[in-house]
Image (cartoon, grey):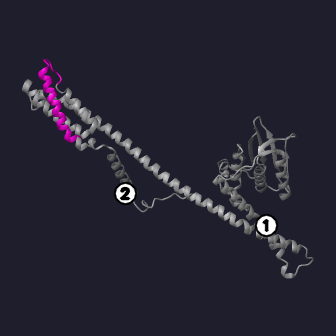
Amino acid sequence: MRATPIDPKREGRPVVLVRLQQVAKLRRHYIAQIPRWRQPLIGYFLSFPFVAIALILTLLLKMTLTHFYFPGALMLLTIVLVAFIWGVGPALLSVILSTLALDYFFIPSSEQLSLQSWDGVAQILPFFLIGIIVAIISGQREAARRRALFAELALKERADELEETNQELKEVNQVKDQFISMASHELKTPITTIRGQAEITLRRLSRQKELPEELAGVSHALEQIDEQTLRLNALVDDLLDLSSIRAGKMKLRLSNFDLREVCQSAVEEQRLLTGRNIELEQPGTPVMLNVDSERLSQVITNLVNNAVKYSPETSPIKVSMEMQEKTIRLVVQDYGQGISKEQQTLIFETFYRTPDAQASKKNGWGLGLAICKDIVERHGGRIWCESRVGEGSTFYVELPRG
């Protein structure tokens, strides 16, 4: 089970406090991205000269034109400009200033009305409402832009955190892979030495017609040592293969081989080692492929060994080869307990073992199928499993013919 990395800066702090600090940080980023001349405070100050300029131009147009019916037109343009650049606050100030200017310079001079009369209110109200609407629309636009920028900054911050975490995990994996590689190399020599010495001692004891009473159980103990060192040696080989795969150092030694010979050799070896009934069906003509015969034999051996391990001793194992138009398909079928559909993809992950396999007394590390998958994919093929619980499992290896 993978542990979720915890930021030491956040550990032990309330979630609400962390969230508030994140919002404050995003707000600072948001403000920092706005140019100084677009800060709202600048908009409040510039609202006065902008409205004054619009008022002067309006007065000039009134003196120039005989019929001037829309004295608030330039004022509205000013409000729109202020709202677009500086937002809702300065826009509302511009609305108030423009309304007061129109009331003072135009309505009293034309009809001697003021905001204290209903007629004056009726003339100023449309302009005031339009200005308020422009300010509100500007505020909504600014809020939407702020939310979008907040979301963008939050995503960027999250992406940076994930990138940092990913980099840390890569470094941890590299250290782990280096340790596995170094430990496997260091274990290889003593395991080989122990096994060699045990075999030599066994051969010497076997030459003795009668063993002393104190050496009666030594032979059995040496056999156990030989068996366990063989198992450890297989584990070290798998770990070395896994280390090579993760480091991208596993290279295939490709050459033209008859796939039938590779299958025949692997199946016969498993027959001798296990004594099980392993049926082999192959085409009558050579099946030439450009493959790494040693690695492909490793795949077949692993699949057959798994079939033997997880099926009843009295049931047969079937190994066959199917010729497709563009591919060749190897099939290994057993009649064991089967694998659930949810686990049929998980079994090809490193160190994964099904719950039934873990509960059984069968030895295993969950490395074999992961290595098989990598070897097959390096040959440009694919491997998968089809199974029903209680009916056995069938593993397929498909390789390109070209």
Residue drawn at (17%, 34%) of the image: 51
CA distance separating discs 2 and 1: 60 Å
- The stretch in magenta equals 43-70
Image x and y of residue 378, in percent: 69, 46
Residue 52 among magenta residues: yes
- Secondary structure, mark 2, is helix
Whether pointer 2 and pointer 1 mark residues with C-beta atoms closer than 8 Å, the reply is no
Residue drawn at (42%, 63%) of the image: 12
Residue behind mark 1? 227
Quarter of the image where the N terminus is located: bottom right
Q: Amino acid at mark 1?
A: Glu
Instruction: Characterize the local packing of mark 2: few (<14), some (14-19) or many (20 or more) Cα atoms within 10 angstroms.
Output: few
Residue drawn at (84%, 55%) of the image: 269
Q: Decide which of 141, 235 is in the foreground and name it.
A: 235
Figure check: 138 above or below 216: above
- The quadrant in which residue 203 appears is bottom right
Image x and y of residue 275, in percent: 85, 57
Q: Is residue 115 visible?
A: yes
- The quadrant in which residue 134 appears is top left
- Secondary structure, mark 1, is helix
Residue behind mark 2? 17
As drawn, the residue found furthest toward the top would be 66
Image x and y of residue 36, in percent: 28, 44
Figure check: 134 above or below 161: above
Residue drawn at (89%, 79%) of the image: 211
Figure check: 79 above or below 350: above
Q: Amino acid at mark 2?
A: Leu
Q: Is residue 100 left or right of residue 26?
A: left
Q: Is residue 293 left or right of residue 128?
A: right
Instruction: Characterize the local packing of mark 1: few (<14), some (14-19) or many (20 or more) Cα atoms within 10 angstroms.
Output: few
**Mark 2 against mark 1, which lies toward the viewer?**
1
